[in-house]
Image (tube, rainbow, N blue to C red):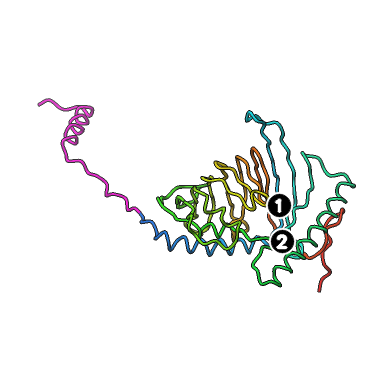
C-alpha cells in the first residue's frame, strides 16, 4: 500500500474542504441613527451653552485675507494676528502683529486707544438697546448666532462619518425661506445650503460647510452684503475637555457684515491657545491691567 506524503495529504484536505458549504460570518449590527429632530434640538441647546462658555475665554487668532483682481488672481495678501478677549462684556480683537511684524510702540498705543473708544461706544449702544427692551449682542447690534442657524432651516440625508478620528453624524442643511427671524441679520441663514457635522458622543456641532444660494443684503448692502455663491467652512475643536470652540474658519467669495468680517476673495481665521480669562479692565500698550483682587 502506497503511503501518502505530507504534501499529498495537505492537497487532499484542501480539495475536500473546498467542497464544504461556505461558512459566512453573521452580519454586523448597524447602529440605527437617532431621531434627527430630537438630535438637532439637543445640538442647538449644546451650541447655545458653547457660545456662552466662549465668553470666558481669551485666545489667539491669525486672520489671513486674500484680495482678488478682476481676473481672479491674488493681488494682495494680508496677515493680522490678534488676541481676542472681552472687556466689560464687549468682545475685543487686540492687534498684536501685522504681516508677521510686531507693532511699534506708537502703533500699540494707537491700538489701545482704538480699543478703549470701541468698548465705550459699544457699551453705550448696548445700554440704549437694553433700555428699549430690545435683544442685542454685546455690542448693541442685532444678535446673530450659530445656534439660530439650527432653528432656521431643515435637515435631511443623515449619515455617519468619521471626522478627526471621532464618530460624527453629517446632515444636509437648507435654509427655510419662510422661517421667522428675530432681526434683519438672521435672514442670512435662510439663504444658506450646506452640511453640518455633529459629534455623536458630545452632541456638539463640530463642522459646518455652507454656500449662499442667493445674494444677501441688509439696508441695501450698507450694513451687510454677501454675494451669491460665497462659501465657507467652520471647524471646531474640543477645549479643556469641556466645550467645542471655533478653531478654523474659511470663506471664499465676497462678504461683509458690520465689524465681524469683510473679504473679497478669501479669508482664513485660525484660532488657538484658548485659555479662561475674565477682565473688566482697559488695555494698555504694555499689556492687560487686571482688576485688583476683591
Estimate the x, y position of residue 82 in percent, counting from the top left: 75, 49
- Residue plotted at (12% across, 25% down): 2
In x, y percent, where is residue 191? 52, 50
Q: Quadrant of residue 215?
A: top right
Which quadrant, please, contains the N terminus? top left
Magenta region: 1-30
Left or right of residue 224, residue 41 in this image? left
Quadrant location of the C terminus in the rendered image: bottom right
Q: Quadrant of residue 189?
A: bottom right
Question: Mark 1 — residue?
Answer: 259
Q: Residue at 78%, 60% (x, y): give it.
A: 119
Which sits earlier in the primary sequence, circle 1 or circle 2?
2
**Local crowd size for mark 1, using a 10 Å CA cut-off: few (<14), some (14–19), many (≥20):** few
Q: Residue furthest right?
A: 106
Determine whether, in the image, residue 29 is placed left or right of residue 271: left
Q: Between 253 and 272, which is closer to the camera in this rendering?
A: 253
**Which residue is at the far left?**
1
Q: Tell me what residue is drawn at x 16 percent, y 34 percent.
A: 16
Q: State left or right for residue 117 relative to residue 266.
A: right
Q: For the point 58% across and 48% down, which residue is it?
A: 216
- Taking depth in this image into account, of 89 and 6 the one nearest to the observer is 89
| Residue furthest to the top | 2
Pointer 1 with pointer 2, Cβ within 8 A: yes
The vertical placement of 164 against 141, above or below, is above
Outermost residue on the front side: it is 220
Quickly name the residue at label 2: 139
Q: CA distance from mark 1 to mark 2?
A: 10 Å
Amino acid at each position: 500500500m502506497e503511503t501518502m506524503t505530507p504534501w499529498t495529504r495537505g492537497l487532499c484536505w484542501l480539495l475536500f474542504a473546498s467542497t464544504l458549504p461556505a461558512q459566512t460570518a453573521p452580519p454586523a449590527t448597524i447602529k440605527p441613527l437617532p431621531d434627527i429632530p430630537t438630535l438637532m434640538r439637543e445640538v442647538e441647546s449644546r451650541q447655545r451653552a458653547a457660545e456662552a462658555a466662549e465668553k470666558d475665554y481669551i485666545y489667539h487668532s491669525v486672520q489671513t485675507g486674500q484680495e482678488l483682481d478682476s481676473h481672479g488672481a491674488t493681488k494682495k495678501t494680508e496677515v493680522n494676528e490678534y488676541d481676542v478677549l472681552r472687556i466689560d462684556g464687549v468682545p475685543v480683537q487686540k492687534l498684536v502683529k501685522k504681516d508677521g511684524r510686531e507693532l511699534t510702540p506708537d502703533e500699540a498705543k494707537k491700538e489701545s486707544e482704538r480699543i478703549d473708544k470701541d468698548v465705550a461706544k459699544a457699551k453705550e449702544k448696548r445700554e440704549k438697546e437694553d433700555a428699549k427692551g430690545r435683544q442685542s449682542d454685546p455690542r448693541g447690534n442685532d444678535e446673530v448666532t450659530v445656534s439660530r442657524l439650527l432653528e432656521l432651516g431643515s435637515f435631511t440625508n443623515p449619515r455617519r462619518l468619521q471626522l478627526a478620528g471621532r464618530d460624527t453624524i453629517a446632515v444636509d442643511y437648507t435654509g427655510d425661506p419662510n422661517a421667522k427671524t428675530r432681526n434683519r441679520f438672521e435672514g442670512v441663514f435662510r439663504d444658506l445650503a450646506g452640511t453640518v457635522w455633529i459629534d455623536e458622543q458630545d452632541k456638539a456641532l463640530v463642522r459646518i460647510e455652507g454656500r449662499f444660494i442667493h445674494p444677501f443684503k441688509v439696508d441695501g448692502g450698507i450694513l451687510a452684503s454677501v454675494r451669491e455663491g460665497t462659501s465657507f467652512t467652520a471647524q471646531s475643536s474640543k477645549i479643556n475637555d469641556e466645550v467645542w470652540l471655533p478653531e478654523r474658519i474659511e470663506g471664499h467669495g465676497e462678504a461683509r457684515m458690520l465689524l465681524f468680517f469683510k473679504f473679497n476673495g478669501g479669508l482664513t481665521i485660525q484660532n488657538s491657545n484658548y485659555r479662561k480669562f475674565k477682565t473688566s479692565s482697559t488695555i494698555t500698550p504694555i499689556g492687560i491691567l487686571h482688576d485688583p483682587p476683591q
